């Protein structure tokens, strides 16, 4: 009987065009707009060496060595062009360099306009001056301090915990697509609401017939939820494949893991919708409440403002561990940057735990409903 009900629930769910649109059509359309808006931004914003002109008036070997050190390699900070003052001013005027560094008894800087690159050059020079003055003062007080300072400079001081990173997608804008998939998963709440409302005698004629039918209420509800969950997962998976294969979004996460996250997210959305539908008891109330709750979760996760989840982490980290949208997007992020680790497993377990809690609460509420007459 369960399989018989499940078959017809799937047929009915596939005919619900509104739910199909919100689960697949809307994420696909919004994802296309995201791709148009963010597609080339990261490539344009990748850091390049800052071109600077070095004009030597009075040679300072220490400064030159420091400048050469920070400019070494492909990831160096500066691209140094040693030249005379006349040529340097021409380069600055034509935008070929971001600033002119004058190497004299006192290091100075000339820029054409303010901006990020001139600010970085100025910050570097300020730090060099501060460190040089500190070292000179220490040596003047006691010449033996040169050995202590030398040891300090050779010692790598790193206050951060080092963690190995994967060779994933470093594009910061990919997080918008993570949150888009999270929103798509949470829209599965509409399926949970539909399953509840179509099983209650006071909300639909179909619900009344089900209540008097010689079929276990548990089997009927389970089949309905299973059908809605299957449709939600398939639509979300289709949205993922559209973003990945058609738009060419590089998520930096293996497809199998992405499907696992989407499965956990879809079931969570379904469970939350099931609970809201059981509590509200009417479509006019439950759908607006569900949409408002889900969009709030997505906003706090960073769908509209990219760094919102980081801001929440600073002020109220506990909320990110209760926000299903944040857990879904963070699971994608962790797999992309670090690979499968304890944080990813924790996110999936919390999502699963929340799903069990909301499903149990919804089942408790709907199971206790009784009707005086049908």
Image (cartoon, grey):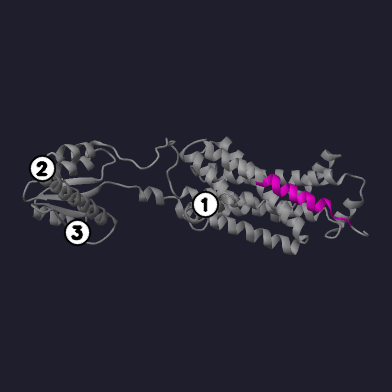
SS at badge 1: helix
- When asked about the image quadrant of residue 66, the answer is top left
Q: Is residue 63 left or right of residue 305?
A: left
Residue 102 position within the rendered picture, expressed as x and y whole percent measured from the top left: 12, 53
- Label 1 to label 3, Cα distance in Å? 42 Å
**Quadrant (top left/top right/bottom left/bottom right) for the N terminus:** top right
Does residue 111 appear to the left or right of 237 in the view shown?
left
Residue 137 position, x and y percent, is: 14, 49
210 w.r.t. 148: above or below = below
Q: How many marks?
A: 3
Q: Residue 235: in sight, yes or no?
A: no
Q: Farthest residue in the bottom direction? A: 284
Of callouts 3 and 2, the N-terminal one? 2
Q: Nearer the viewer, residue 27 or 360?
A: 360
- Residue 368 part of the magenta-drawn span: yes
* Range covered by the magenta-colored residues: 354-370
Q: Which residue is mark 3?
A: 111
Q: CA distance from mark 3 to mark 2?
A: 23 Å
Residue position for label 2? 61
The quadrant of the picture occupied by the C terminus is bottom right
* Residue in view at x 75 percent, y 56 percent: 277
| Image location (x, y in percent) of residue 64 | 14, 43
- Kind of element beneath mark 3: loop
Indicate left or right for 55 with 48 as reference: left
Which mark is on residue 317? Answer: 1
């Amino acid at each position: 009987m369960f399989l018989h009900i499940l078959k017809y629930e799937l047929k009915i769910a596939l005919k619900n065009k509104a739910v199909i649109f919100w689960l697949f059509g809307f994420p696909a359309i919004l994802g296309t707009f995201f791709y148009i808006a963010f597609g080339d931004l990261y490539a344009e914003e990748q850091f390049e060496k800052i071109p600077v002109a070095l004009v030597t008036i009075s040679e300072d070997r220490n400064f030159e060595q420091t400048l050469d050190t920070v400019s070494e390699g492909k990831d160096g900070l500066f691209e140094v062009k040693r030249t005379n003052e006349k040529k340097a001013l021409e380069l600055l005027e034509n935008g070929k360099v971001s600033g002119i560094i004058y190497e004299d008894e006192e290091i100075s800087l000339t820029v054409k306009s303010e901006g990020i690159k001139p600010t970085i050059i100025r910050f570097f020079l300020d730090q060099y001056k501060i460190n040089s003055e500190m070292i000179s003062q220490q040596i003047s007080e006691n010449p033996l301090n040169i050995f202590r300072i030398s040891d300090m400079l050779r010692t790598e001081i790193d206050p951060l915990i080092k963690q190995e990173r994967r060779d994933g997608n470093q594009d910061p804008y990919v997080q918008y697509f993570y949150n888009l998939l999270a929103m798509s998963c949470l829209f599965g709440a509409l399926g949970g609401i539909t399953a509840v409302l179509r099983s209650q005698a006071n909300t639909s004629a179909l619900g009344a017939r089900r209540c008097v039918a010689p079929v276990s209420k548990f089997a009927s509800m389970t089949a309905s939820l299973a059908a809605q969950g299957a449709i939600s997962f398939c639509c979300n998976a289709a949205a993922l494949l559209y973003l990945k294969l058609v738009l060419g979004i590089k998520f930096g996460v293996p497809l199998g893991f992405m499907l696992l996250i989407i499965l956990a997210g879809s079931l969570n959305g379904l469970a939350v919708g099931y609970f809201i539908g059981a509590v509200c008891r009417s479509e006019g109330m439950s759908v607006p409440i569900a949409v408002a709750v889900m969009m709030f979760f997505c906003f706090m996760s960073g769908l509209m403002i990219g760094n919102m989840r980081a801001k929440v982490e600073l002020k109220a980290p506990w909320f990110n561990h209760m926000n299903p949208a944040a857990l879904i997007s963070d699971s994608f992020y962790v797999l992309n940057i670090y690979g499968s680790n304890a944080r990813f497993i924790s996110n999936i377990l919390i999502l699963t735990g929340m799903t069990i809690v909301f499903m149990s609460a919804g089942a408790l509420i709907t199971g206790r409903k009784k009707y005086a007459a049908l």
